[in-house]
């Protein structure tokens, strides 16, 4: 599988998302990763479908929304409407992951299912045949700049073993020191945030 780069704007200055996004696209980004947080599933609040729609309209997509929100079923339509290429929601946030995957795919949007570090891969295996992407969180969601949790690399390896053809995304603590092991373990889609904003000293 071809690796895909999905830079996150979470750690960018919120008063100017456009400059770093243009740089990310020029640097080879495949999708712009929007970390949507609701202050409930995770403590911080970030941004929503309006930002996704604005980026798409300005030709700065494709955009993927990583929904760290409770009851994602209440908000899927707005992200579809915004023109997201892919919407990723959390298995822990809904009792209806299969139905939401169906809803997204019927809307012509790629469906991704995410699991936290404390959630077993079974949540993904149950619906793997219907998924476009599995997101194995490699930190506890909510904040950029955290260190990758090593045990999550083994979850990626186990999921790759069980699902040889499923695109697997990793998110959290991805940088030039960790990306090699994640690729070796079977990840295909790489989210990186804070590492991209580090300037060489
Ligand atoms: C964490 C977010 C990540 C975050 C990654 O909740 O889902 O996308 O931005 O940030 P880094 O690359 O700094 O770990
Ligand atoms: Zn994310």
Image: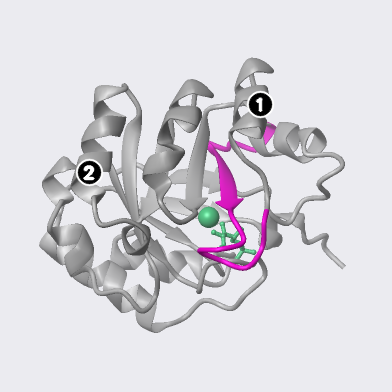
Expressed as whole percent of the image width and height from the top left, the position of residue 145 reads 67, 70
| Contact check, label 1 and label 2, Cβ < 8 Å | no
Residue at the (32%, 56%) spot, across then down? 94
Disc 1 from disc 2: Cα separation: 25 Å
What is the magenta range? 26-45
Q: Quadrant of the C terminus?
A: bottom right
Residue at the (40%, 51%) spot, across then down? 71
Q: Say which residue label 1 marks.
A: 55
The answer to which of 72 and 143 lies nearer the viewer is 72
Q: Main secondary structure of the magenta part?
A: loop
On screen, residue 199 versus residue 24, left or right, reads right
Q: Can residue 24 be found in the magenta stretch?
A: no
To which quarter of the image does residue 124 belong? bottom left
Q: Say which residue label 2 marks.
A: 131
Residue at the (62%, 75%) spot, across then down? 146
**Pointer 1 or 2: first along the chain:** 1
Q: Quadrant of ligand 1?
A: bottom right
**Element marked by disc 1:** helix
**Is 61 situated above or below 193?**
above
On screen, residue 77 versus residue 50, left or right, reads left
């Amino acid at each position: 599988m071809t690796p895909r780069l999905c830079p996150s704007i979470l750690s960018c200055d919120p008063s100017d998302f456009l400059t770093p996004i243009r740089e990310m696209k020029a640097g080879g980004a495949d999708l712009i990763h929007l970390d949507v947080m609701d202050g409930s599933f995770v403590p911080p609040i970030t941004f929503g479908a309006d930002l996704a729609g604005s980026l798409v309209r300005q030709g700065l997509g494709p955009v993927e929304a990583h929904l760290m929100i409770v009851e994602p079923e209440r908000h899927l339509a707005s992200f579809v409407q915004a023109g997201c290429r892919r919407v990723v929601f959390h298995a822990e946030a809904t009792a209806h992951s299969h139905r939401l995957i169906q809803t997204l795919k019927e809307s012509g949007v790629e469906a991704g299912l995410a699991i936290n570090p404390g959630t077993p891969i079974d949540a993904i295996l149950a619906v793997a045949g219907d998924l476009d992407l599995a997101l194995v969180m490699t930190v506890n969601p909510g904040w950029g700049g955290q260190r990758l949790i090593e045990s999550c690399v083994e979850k990626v390896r186990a999921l790759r073993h069980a699902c040889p053809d499923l695109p697997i995304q990793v998110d959290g603590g991805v940088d030039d020191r960790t990306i090699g092991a994640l690729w070796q373990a079977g990840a295909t889609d790489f989210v990186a945030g804070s590492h991209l904003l580090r300037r060489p000293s």
